[in-house]
Amino acid sequence: MWNEEIETMPREDIYELQLKKLQSTVKRAFDKIPYYNKKYSEANVFPEDIETLEDIEKLPFLTKDDLRACYPFGMFAVDKKEIIEVHSSSGTTGKPVVSGYTQNDIDNWGEIVARGLTMMGLDSDDIIQNTHGYGLFTGGFGVHYGAHRLGATIIPISTGQTRRQVEIMADFGTTCLIFTPSYGIYLGEVAKEEGIDFDKLGLKAIGFGAEMWTAEMRDRIEETFKTKAYNIYGLTELMGPGVGIECSAQNGLHIAEDFFYPEIINPKTGETLAEGKHGELVLTNLERESMPIIRFRTKDLTALHYDTCKCGRTLARMERITGRSDDMIKVKGVAIFPSQIEKALLKVSNIEPHYQIIVTRPDIMDEIEIKVEASASLFSDDIKEMMAVKRKIGEYIQNETGIAVNVSLVAPKSIPRSTKGKIQRVIDKRNLH
Amino acid sequence: MWNEEIETMPREDIYELQLKKLQSTVKRAFDKIPYYNKKYSEANVFPEDIETLEDIEKLPFLTKDDLRACYPFGMFAVDKKEIIEVHSSSGTTGKPVVSGYTQNDIDNWGEIVARGLTMMGLDSDDIIQNTHGYGLFTGGFGVHYGAHRLGATIIPISTGQTRRQVEIMADFGTTCLIFTPSYGIYLGEVAKEEGIDFDKLGLKAIGFGAEMWTAEMRDRIEETFKTKAYNIYGLTELMGPGVGIECSAQNGLHIAEDFFYPEIINPKTGETLAEGKHGELVLTNLERESMPIIRFRTKDLTALHYDTCKCGRTLARMERITGRSDDMIKVKGVAIFPSQIEKALLKVSNIEPHYQIIVTRPDIMDEIEIKVEASASLFSDDIKEMMAVKRKIGEYIQNETGIAVNVSLVAPKSIPRSTKGKIQRVIDKRNLH
Ligand SMILES: [Zn+2]
Ligand SMILES: [Zn+2]
């Protein structure tokens, strides 16, 4: 184990540690961040009200809307000078959400991921080929910092150039691959085409994450790469990948409970649910200098377990995410909200603001189509004009979401409405649940 | 200054320091790396022959061919366990070139770039928007590690999503942009379209690099962004960006002479040239644990100056790179060799191995066309088959080089030959020199 003391700490001690950290986090947030001060004052709850861990339920939830209201730097508890890195995730509407890090936050991120990579059976001898993208997205960097901390060798290849990935995997003796399930399955296909024999390659583990997955997908990955595949969970608002990582038991993801306090709530009522009950995951940063996030509604549906794991760790385990409590969709590992599509469409004239998002997975890669109703005048116009509008829509959506989509322009009022006149915004045909 | 002692060291002291470091580097390379041991033994030169700095001329040059012969890890002077990160640049033919880093090497990289960012007038208060790509390419990471070391805020946005770049620049209060000149000029155009007023934005500096540039390009960049723009030079084999960075005087790039020993040679004869003479830059790592590179022929054409700079620094300055001594071309910031195109074409049947690379810059972005002669049978075949071959060629070239190209299939023997029957491989119409 990377940190046996923490990873096997008796539950009582974990709770004690968490309470102490929660109290100081809430106090810091209240004292340093006007947004929390106002929000908590209005809810008539104050730092001194947190006397037990259960008292956290007195605190109002935080949502993406709160973070957006603080855009860009209103959630920082430290001077901007102390921030050394900024990431960002797409927002549900309008502005994106910002995530800041001090040097200590970056160090802790590396520590947490190094611990998780150790759970996956890796050590400083390993060679980790990281196909996650680097950029404002936290996927690439989380694994990068974790690998540095572990002392392993990181190959920061990021996504794409798949044939080169295969060549490097074989030539460098990669022992661990990091990928999104859909890219991993594609990578496996290409590797097979190129004649790679995974029995000989000597992979020790695969870390996958950043999109929804099924047991069948994991089976297919393990069968292709001839090694065990472990899920990595995280989100930019709280830190990035590493919030939870699976151990050898592959029976849920151990949450780094000294850094995050997890709760499960009923997404409709907000009521806290007991161990083993399915609901929405709510997370709280317990040790984050830059930007303490308290009771953040992740919208991810899962359940928590607190019994000691077969691996010997006492850290809580979360189940595989089985869905979302909102209309976010993940396509090719990227989170997309209908509101982003709306924002992009508003920039284009000659179309109606009526659209539908259709997600499919014809074989192994996600495809996304945006069906948009053209204006009556455009629809009767010449084809060249329509092509130009289509191209423009595609360009704006890619700028907004970062991914390429297929755009189709359809006749006004041709997208089916419900009896209440509403369009079903997202049609996900991938059957992921 | 970041490190005044080194940056203003009297020339005598720099030479003394360099000699000591060179001696120990050559000894380590000879003792630890069989490839050097054999190469130097065959040339009948040994570590103890290095008694003065000029004695470096006794050592044979290192080229990409040498590095390729050592692919993947034959240049490592330390156990693979000590390597924590691996980058790679495209090779002239066949295998790419590998660059490895220990923890100390990564720390030094950060140190060198932090020093350079300080020369550009930045400090820990600054917000650096890094549009360089992250990945096996070193561009993104060099600036990233330097910004961390400086304690500035890094926005690791990488290339693309240009409208979002503009939004973030305005919202986050970016004070420094890092880009390739061609992407920078494009970014400037988009920013203008979006109504950004650079007089109000408060940029303090721009760092640009990773492709050839002209004084006119710098003028255009400074005029657009209303701030000074500084060139950053480096190459993956030696470390990455940061080998040389411009100071406020904008009169050449200061080389981090405590980490790199620069020479200028006549690329035809290999003879060392005097201060101020134009020739090929040769570089030597003076303090690199993982992979000491000694007398590497960069193929970049420049000149060196050793007089004290207006800024007060004594560190040698190299002029802007004005050309290459080989047939490498840089397109959209990516190095491409005809041999990579050849390698890709060899994988496609139904075409002749005759091709031409045509680079243009219609407005501000590079475009690259690969003209390939189809086989007689394919050329008389139906259009669908030709389209499929074209697509395949494009895909293989993108896998090899990382960039998208336009492919055109032409009739057998239609590309003009010289009287000796040779095709001019590269036609660069960009007028960069
Ligand atoms: Zn376990
Ligand atoms: Zn200077």
Image: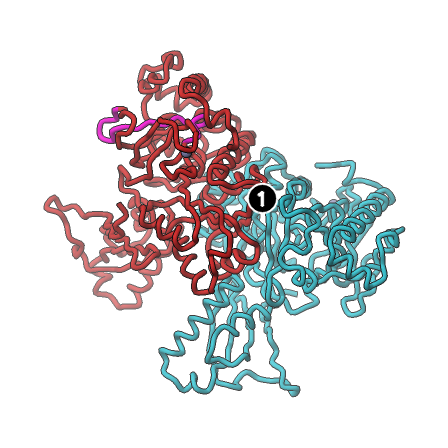
Chain colours: A red, B cyan
The residue that mark 1 highlights is A125
Residue at x-position 55% and y-position 58%:
B182
Q: As rendered, which of B106 and A81 lies closer to the eye?
A: B106
Given the current orientation, which residue lies at the most extreme left position? A419
Q: Is residue A266 magenta?
A: yes
* A306 to the left or right of A13: left
Residue A95, image quadrant? top left
Residue at x-position 74% and y-position 45%:
B287
* A378 to the left or right of B151: left
- On screen, residue A398 above or below B113: below
Residue A387, image quadrant? bottom left
The picture places residue A300, in percent across and down from the top left corner, at 31, 37
Q: As rendered, which of A349 and A56 lies closer to the eye?
A: A56
Quarter of the image with the N terminus of chain B is: top right
Graded by Cα atoms within 10 Å as few (under 14), some (14 to 19) or many (20 or more), the crowding at tag 1 reads some
Which contiguous range is marked in magenta?
A: A255-271
Q: As rendered, which of B135 and B154 lies closer to the eye?
A: B135
The picture places residue B176, in percent across and down from the top left corner, at 57, 43
